[in-house]
Amino acid sequence: MKSKLKKPVAVVGYSGHSYVIIDILLNAGRMVTAYCDSSEKREKSLSFIVSRH
Amino acid sequence: MYLGTEMQALDELEEFDYFIGVGHNGIRRKVYNALFDRLGNPINAIHPSAVVSASVEMKYGTMISANATINPLVTLGTGVICNTSSSIDHECVVDDFAHIGPGAVLCGNVKVGANTFVGANAVVKQGVTIGQNVTIGAGTVVIRDIPDNVMVVGNPQRVLVKEEVQKLAAA
């Protein structure tokens, strides 16, 4: 039987535009738990963005 | 959790649904092309406050922001961005990796080519066809068809000549 649980979401690219994407996905009930970019972002981290939601 | 670059993280990304959070049309397409063979299509991201007709045909990796309205029989390609409060009216066709900016209005039956950017609060009259790789400046009023690969601004629209585009790029 196929699971109905949705996978967590990874966002590819992490800057201003992706903050909006993350907000949309969180508002739509998805879990955003990971991101890809050229380097790890210390400021405005994913946990910071998610925790403010 | 930081996974590295998308190419470093391909194995890990298989455990996730993914979305390409890149605003630049060309770079978004490039990332999509790099990931598609291995990961398949990205999910769509639709804000709950957006109004999207049930008859909209939508591909993958499309972002529909807060308060956007997508009216009946619209077709949205892959990787399209319908930004905050944009309005896309009946039977419009927005091709792959186009970006409809915040507050922009496409009246009915407008066609937007691939990779085209429609700036914030631009208005496109009904029935107009816009080519590929076009940039439409913020607040532009588009009343006539636009060919591929140009930049237009103003009310009514005018195509910028090469020197004007270079001057803007240098500013």
Image (tube, coloured by chain):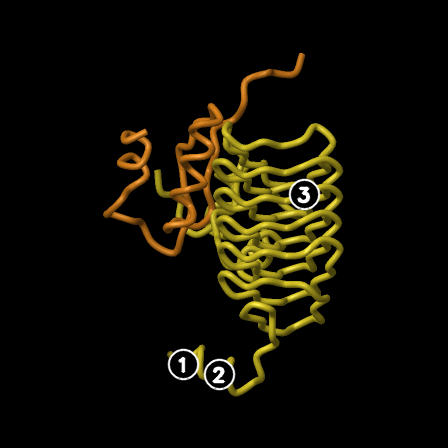
Chain colours: A orange, B yellow
Which residue sits furthest top?
A: A1
Which quadrant is the N terminus of chain A positioned in?
top right
User: Residue beneath label 3, please?
Assistant: B89
Number of callouts: 3
- Tell me if B114 is positioned left or right of B16 in this view: right
Q: Of A15 and B170, which appears nearest the observer?
A: B170
| B140 in relation to B44, above or below | below
Q: Pinpoint residue B36: horizontal percent, then vertical percent.
A: 64, 47
Foreground disc of the pair 1, 3 = 3
**Chain bearing mark 3:** B
- Tell me if B50 is positioned left or right of B95 in this view: left
Q: Of B162 and A10, which appears nearest the observer?
A: B162
Snapshot quadrant of residue A26: top left
Dot 3: element:
loop
Amino acid type of the residue that numbered disc 2 sits on in the rendered structure:
Gln
**Chain bearing mark 1:** B
Q: Which mark identifies residue B170?
A: 1
Do tags 1 and 3 sit on the same chain? yes
Dot 1: element:
helix
Classify 10 Å Cα crowding around label 1: few (below 14), some (14-19), many (20 and above): few
Amino acid type of the residue that numbered disc 1 sits on in the rendered structure:
Ala
Labels 1 & 2 near each other (Cβ < 8 A)? yes
Labels 3 & 2 near each other (Cβ < 8 A)? no
Which residue sits furthest front?
A: B156
